Image (cartoon, helix red, strand yellow):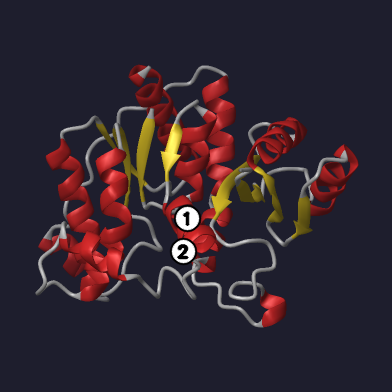
Amino acid sequence: MNVRETRLIVISPASHITPDQLTRTIHAMGKNVTVKESCYGAVIEGEKEVVREVISEVRKLDVNGIFSKVRAFRVADPRRCRAHHGTRPGFAQLEQEWEDLWKIHRGLDRTDKGEKASVRTERKKLSVEGFKRICEVK
Amino acid sequence: MKIFIDPPNSLILYDLVERFGHEPLSTMAAIQEKIDRTEIDMPPMNVSLEDVMKGLKYAGIEVPSGVRGRLAVWGPMIEDAEAAIIMEDCPYSFGCVGCHRTNLMVRYLIKRKGIPVLDVNYPNDEDEGKDIVAKIKEFLEGLK
C-alpha cells in the first residue's frame, strides 16, 4: 500500500524565493503530487517517496532557506481548510516559527562556513535591586 | 536514529533533525495515523477508548484529561525514541496548568528513559540561531 504524505514547505523570510516560484517549480517537475500555494510557501501531497523526491529537488532553489515538515491533515481537508472555514489551531505556532526562520537560515549559512556554537554564560535571575530600577520611575 | 523533538510539532526541530540525517518523531505523524486508519472525526480533540487507556499508562486517573490525552500521543513516541532534543522557552509553548504539566511530564519521561538529550533555547537573535544549528548538528552527528 502506498503511504500518502502531506508536507508544508515553508520559505524563510530571508530567502529570495517566493511561494509562486516554488509552486511553479513543483508543477514544472511533472510529478504526481497535489500542490497548493500558500502565504508561507506551499503544501504538497502525494506518495511518500514522490513527495520526498520533490522536497529534495525543490530545496536546491535555496538549500538553507527552504524548510519542511509533515502535516497530519490532507490538503484541503474541510476540518482545516480555510475555504471551508476550518479551524487552524496550529497556525499561531507556525506563524511564530516562520517569523524566526531567518535566524535558523542564517545559522545554517554560518555553520556551513564552519562556525561553531559559542559558549554562553548562563542567564541569571533578575536581582531585587535590578527589578526595582526597572519598575520605579525616578 | 529516531529522535523525539519537544515541542513535538516544531517546524524548526523537525526540519533540522531531518536535514542532518535522522528520523524526527512528531505529533503530526501520530495524528496522521488516526486520520488515515481510524478515521476519528476531529483528532486530536476526539479520542478513542484505546487512546484513553494509553494515556493512563503515563498519568493517573486523577490527572486532568488534557494531560492524559496529550501523553496518549506523545508517550508511545518517547518510548520509541533513541535520543531527544528539547527546545526551551518557546514563545508559543505556554498555557494552562494542563499544558504546562504535560510539558514537565514529557521532560520527566525523557530523562527517566535515559536516552541522550540535547537542551537548546528558542533563538532570540541570529547568534542564537547559529548556536542552535551548530549544537543540533554536533549532537546528531555524534549519534551516528
Report which quarter residue A79 is drawn in.
Answer: bottom right
Disc 1 target residue: B33
Badge 2 density bin: few <14, some 14–19, many ≥20, Cα 10 Å: few
Q: Amino acid at mark 1?
A: Glu
* Subunit bearing disc 2: B
Q: Quadrant of the N terminus of chain B?
A: top left
The residue to which callout 2 is attached is B38
Distance of label 2 from label 1 (alpha carbons): 7 Å
On screen, B105 above or below A65? below
- Which badge, 2 or 1, comes first in the chain's sequence? 1
Q: Is residue B131 visible?
A: yes
Question: At which x and y percent is residue A107?
Answer: 52, 34
Residue drawn at 75 percent across, 36 percent down: A58
What element does badge 1 sit on?
A: helix
Q: Amino acid at mark 2?
A: Thr
Rendering coords of residue A59 (x, y %)? 70, 34
**Residue A64 x %, y %:** 63, 33
- Left or right of B87? Residue B14 is right
A106, A131: nearer the viewer: A106
- Position of residue A94 relative to residue A57, above or below, is below
